[in-house]
Image: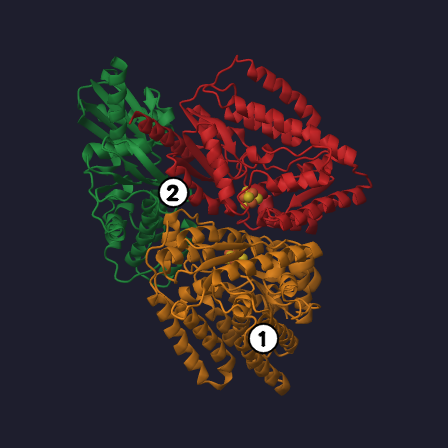
Chain colours: A red, B green, C orange
Amino acid sequence: MPEEIIHAAGMVPIRLTGDSQEPALEEANAYMYINTCSFVRSCLDLVLRNQYHFLDGFVSAATCDCPRRLTDVWKHYDFTPFVHIVDVPRKMTKSAHDLYHNEVQGLKDRLEGFFDVEITDEALRQTIKVFNRTRELLKELYDLRKSDCPPITGAEVLEVLNAGFKMPREEFNGLLERLVGEASSGQRAVKGKFRLMINGSPLNNPEFVKTIEDLGGLVVVDELCTGVRHWWDLVDDSPEIDPVEALSRRYLNNFPCPRMFPPEERFNRALQLVKDYRVDGVVSEVVRYCVHCAHDQPLLRRRLEIQGVPVLELSIEYGASGTGQIMTRVQAFLEMLEGRARR
Amino acid sequence: MFVAGIDIGSRGSKAVIMEDSRMVSFSICETGPESSKTARFTIDEALNGTGLSLEDIGYVVATGYGRILVPFAKANVSEISCHARGANWYFPSVRTILDMGGQDCKAINCDENGRVTNFIMNDKCAGGTGRFLEVIADVLQVPLDEIGDLSLKSTQDITFSTVCAVFAKSEALALLRKGVSRSDILAGLHDAIAVRCLNLLKRVVINKDFTVTGGISKNIGMVEKIKNKVGLEPVLAPDPQIIGALGAALFAQEKAQAQSK
Amino acid sequence: MTLKVADTTKLGEIIEVVDAVAQMQRQRHERQPDAINYEIVVGYFRRVQRAKEEGKLLVSHTPMIPPEIFYAMDIVPLQLEFAATVAAQIVKGVEDCFSAAAAFGLAPEICSAQRLIAGQAIQGWLPRPDALVWSNQVCDNTAKGSNLLAEVYDCPRFFLDRSYQYSERGVQYFTQQLQELICFLEDLTGRKMDWDRFAEVMERSRRLQELHREIRELRKAVPSPWRNLWFIHMMGTEMYMAGTAEAIAHLEAIRDAARQKVEEGKGYVQEEKFRLLTIFVPPACAWALMGWMQGKHGAVCVAEPYFSYRDGENIDPGKPLESLARKSFYCPICGPMHGPAEEGILRDAVRDAIDYRAEGAVCFASIGCRQTDACIRMLKDSLQEKAGIPTLVLDNDTYDPTYVPEDQLKDKLEEFFELLEERK
Ligand code: SF4
Ligand code: SF4
C-alpha cells in the first residue's frame, strides 16, 4: 500500500498497529473470530476502544485474509467515512504489474474524488523524495549495525521505526538525520554475546526485543514487515518515469513478504541479510494464526540450518513482551549458541 | 569445593549439593508464593544433615522459572541447558531428552558433554503438561500420583483431541457422564499427551539413547505410552525431578572452576 | 525433504469402499443421484490410479483450479482437498498424517485441510504427481500450502494468482494467468491445447451451470424436495468434474428427483419442520449429521450462500479462458470466499434467507478457516436485521473429529431446534 499517495494528497498516513502488550482482545473477539491473527485483532481492539478516533479514513490492502476481512468489518460497521482496499497480486510478472498499477491509480482517483483534492505529479515526486530520504537514512542506520559493536540496539531501532509509522514524515526525517549523525560519531558501542536476526510476523513491541538483548543476544538486523521489508527498496525518482508507475513498481517488487510467489525470493533475501550482517542465530516470531509465516517457517528454517544458522521459533501473541517461557527459550538458545561457539 | 544447583519450578523446587561431580544431597519441596523464601527453604532442606551451611557452598546456580529470584545464586542458567547437563551426568550416552515439566514440555538434543545442540518447546497452551494432568486428576477425582497406574488398567481405546486442554476437559466430563471408566479416560488422555510429545521429539533427532525427565516421568502410565509411541525404551534416572537442579549444580562447578583459574 | 515411497494401496482401499457404497445406493430407487455421485468418485480415483500406466500426465491441484482445462488437455487431475476428504473418511491413520505434518514443523494454526494434505503427501498416501498447480483461491492457506508439497514431491509447479476484486482488469489478469497455465501444461505434455475440444468441454460446463440454476429454482418449493447431503455432492462435482458428461448426468439426476417431488407436492422428508440456511461446510468427519438433521428433526437445508452460482452471468464456450476467468468471480466457493463481503456473502446470505424462506441459519465455524470465520459476526447481524432469523454457530474442525465430537454438535443443534420451535 503506497503511503506516498496519501501523503501527496496533503494527508498524514498513519500505519495501523496494535497494542504494545498482550491484551485480552475482548472487544475485538466480539467482531472477529478468534482465529483471526492477533495482530489484526489487536488493531481492531484499539479501534473499538476508540484509540483511533482521529482517523478520517482507512486504506488497506488485500494482502492476506485477515486484513481483507478486517476491511469488510470496518466497512460493515462503518468505523470511518472513507474505506478503500487495494488489490495486490502475489506474483511479480508483467501482467501482475498492470493490475497493480491500475489499483494504485484507483486509490489515487478515489482519494481525489472523496476528499475533493488533487494529487499532482509534482506533489507525488516531492513526496517520493521525502520518503526515499527516510529509506536512505534507515539504510545508513542499519549499515552501522553491521559493525562488531553497533551504536544502537535492536530494541531502540524498533522504537525509531514505530515513531516513523505515526509521525509526519518530514519531522521524522529531521530526527532520523540527527540520530544517524550521533550514531556515526563512534561514541557509543553496544556489545552482545551473539548477533541475532529477528524475523517473522509484524512486531512493534520493543520490549520483546529488549528481553532478548538483556539476555545477551544483540539484534543486529530484522526481516520484518515492520522493519526492512517496509523500507528496504527505493522508489525510482528519475524525472522520466511517471510517479504512479514508479510507486507501483516499487511496492510490488519490494523485499517480498511471505505472501508472494515464488517464496524463494524472500528466502534468498533473508539468507543474504544473514550473511551481510554476520548473524549467528535467527529468532523467528510467528504471531498466532499468522498463516503466511507459519507456512514459510519450516521451509525457511531448513534453509537457514543448512547454512549453519540455528533458528529459535517462538509462537507468540502479537504484542507480547517476552515473559517467562519466551525468556527461558531465548536464554537456552543463547546458551546453545555459546556451546556451539566453544566446540 | 561444594557447589549447589537450585531449580525453582512452577510446582516443585529442588536443590542439589555436589562436590567434585559427586552428589552430596538433594531436596524436593513445594514452591511457595515467594520465590526467594522458597529458594532458601529448599536449599536449607538439602543442607540439612550434611553438616554444611550455605556459607560453605562456593557457587550456586539457579534454574527453573523462578531462577532470577534466588538471592544467593551467583548465576542463572535456563532449565533446558540444565536438563541436558543433568541427564548427561546420569547417562553420558544419552543424546535425546524429553523433559515433561509442570508448565511445558521440551525435546532436547545434546552432545557428549551435555551441551544443548537443538531444542524444541511446546506452545504455551497447557495441553500435555503436568498442569494439564492436575486438572484432569481433579475432574476425575483421582489422586494425582495414582493416575498413571490407573491408566494402565484401561480396557478400551478412546481417542482425545491432541490439541487443546480445555476441550479435553469437557470431553472427559462428557465421557464420565456416559459411564466410561476413569482408567479408559486416563489412558486416552495419556495417549494424547504422548502423541504431542512424539511430535515434539520428531522435530529434533530421536536417538536410541533417550531419557525422560521432569515430574511427569514418575508417572509410569505416561512413560509406558511414550515408550509405545516412540518405539524406544527410555532410560530413567532414579529421581527424574532433580535433573534440572543437578544440571545447575554441574554448571556451578564449571563456573567456579573458571573463576578460580 | 522429498517423498521416498508412495503407498498406493490406500488408493485401492478408497476405490473399493466407495464402489461398495455406490452399489448399495444403486439398489435403492430414491438414491439414484447418490449412486451416480459415488460412481463418479470411483471413476475419478481409478483414473488417478491408472494415469501412469496409461501414460497420462497426473496433475495434483488445490480447489478452484478450473478442471475444464485438464479435461480439455486429456490430463488426469487430482484435487487434493477432495482426495484428502475422501481418504480421511475411509483410510485409517489420519492421526499419523497430522503427526507427520506437525513433525515437519507445520503449526497447529494452519487449517487442518492443509495439514492433512501435507501429511498425506509426506506419508506417501497418494501417487506422486507429475506437476502441482495451486492458487490463492480461496484463502491464504491454499495460497501457501503447496510450496511445501512442491518440495516434498520435487516436481514442476504452477501458481495461479487471481485478483481479489471482480474488475475488468482482474478478469484480464486471470485470463492471462490461465493462458500461462496452459502453456505450462503444454510444455509438460508436449501437446498443444485442442481448442475445439476445449470449447466442447466449456459447453458442458455451461450446461452444468444451467442445471445448478434450475436446481436452485426447484429448491424454493415448500416443502423442500431436497436431500441435505446433495449439496455436498454437487459441490464436489462442480469442483473436480466441471466440463464432463458425468457431471451433467449427476446434476440431471438430482434435478429429476427434486422435480418429481415438487410436482407431487411432497417434501424429501415426510414432515418438514425447519428450513435452514447452511453457512460453510459441516465437518467432513460428520457428514452423517446432514442426514440426521433431516431424518430425525425434519430440518432441511434450503440454501447455501457460499456454494451457489450468482445470477446474471453465463459461460460463453466461444471465449473459454475469459469465461473461466469470469466464472471464478461468481461461481460457488470462490466468489464469496475470495472477494469483499458486503456485495458478496453478506448480500447473498440475506437474499437466500428471504427467497428460500429460511427460519434459521447454521454456521459451521471450522477453527482453521480464518477467512470464513471472520465473517460470522457480520453474517449473524445481517441475517438478524435484514431477514429476521437467528444463527447458530457450531465450532468444529473440518478434519479433526476429536476437536469437537459429533455428539456435542448434535446437542447444540437440538437446542437450536428447540429455540426455533419456540419462535413459531
Ligand atoms: S501476514 Fe500474518 S500478521 Fe500480517 S495480517 Fe496476515 S496473518 Fe496477520
Ligand atoms: S478450510 Fe478454509 S482455510 Fe482451509 S483451505 Fe479451505 S477455505 Fe482455506
- Depth check: give the residue in front, B240 or A109: A109
Find the distance from the CA under tag 1 to the CA under tag 2.
48 Å
| Residue found 68% across the figure and 56% down from its top | C342
C67 up-or-down from A127: above or below: below
Type of amino acid under label 1 = Lys
| Residue found 46% across the figure and 85% down from its top | C28
Q: Is mark 2 within 8 Å of ligand 1?
A: no
Tell me where residue B131 sits by quadrant. top left
Mark 2 residue crowding within 10 angstroms, few (<14) / some (14–19) / many (20+): many
- Horizontal and vertical percent position of residue B183: 28, 57
- Horizontal and vertical percent position of residue C287: 47, 68
Residue ID for mark 2 = B122
Q: Are marks 1 and 2 in one subunit?
A: no
C401 up-or-down from C296: above or below: above
- Horizontal and vertical percent position of residue A248: 67, 42
Type of amino acid under label 2 = Asn
Secondary structure found at label 2: loop
Residue ID for mark 1 = C273
